[in-house]
Amino acid sequence: MTIGDYPKEYDPSAHGQYDPARYYGKPDTPFGDVKLSELAAWLARRKKTPSAVLGACSRAWWRWQHKYMQPRKVGAAPFLQLIVGSIAFFYVINYGKIKHHRNYKYH
């Protein structure tokens, strides 16, 4: 698969219109239904190639877009999620500078 192509599992006659938020491979047990004893086997069945990781990130992005950004009546949720995410990101990257400003009690 190269950049910009459809996944090789996608068949237009069987699947209809292409949806970038859908996984067209063989379905597996959802993560929420995996038992703790089956977790190692479930993780072993995952593809760990860079293209598979990028594909999973792309599907997650499009699912978020379809759920929060592209409905007719968009609420405040996507904007608040972006604000909280950026606050957390900037806190993490600046933690080395912030940790020196802690207030300690000396007694």
Image: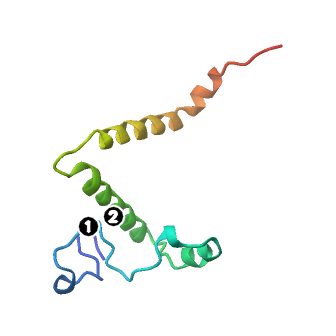
Seen from the viewer's position, the closer of residues 85 and 37 is 37
The type of residue carrying mark 1 is Pro
Q: Position of residue 60 (x, y in %)?
A: 36, 60
Q: Secondary structure at mark 2?
A: helix
Disc 1: CA contacts within 10 A as few (<14), some (14-19) or many (>=20) = some
Q: Pointer 1 and pointer 2: residues touching (CB < 8 Å)?
A: yes
Task: Determine which residue is flagged by label 2.
Answer: 59
Counting the numbered discs, the total is 2
Q: Residue at coordinates 17% horizontally, 82% vertically from top-left?
A: 12
Query: Of the numbered discs in the image, which one, if any, rests on residue 20?
Result: 1
Q: Is residue 8 above or below residue 88?
A: below
Residue at figure coordinates x 52%, y 32% from the top left = 94
Name the residue: 25% across, 57% down. Answer: 66
- What is the quadrant of the C terminus in the image? top right
Viewer-side residue, 70 vs 103: 70
Left or right: 94, with 16 as reference point: right
Residue 9, percent from left and from top: 30, 83
Q: Neighbour class for label 2 at 10 Å: few (<14), some, many (≥20)?
A: some
For badge 2, the amino acid type reads: Arg
Please say if 107 is above or below 69.
Answer: above
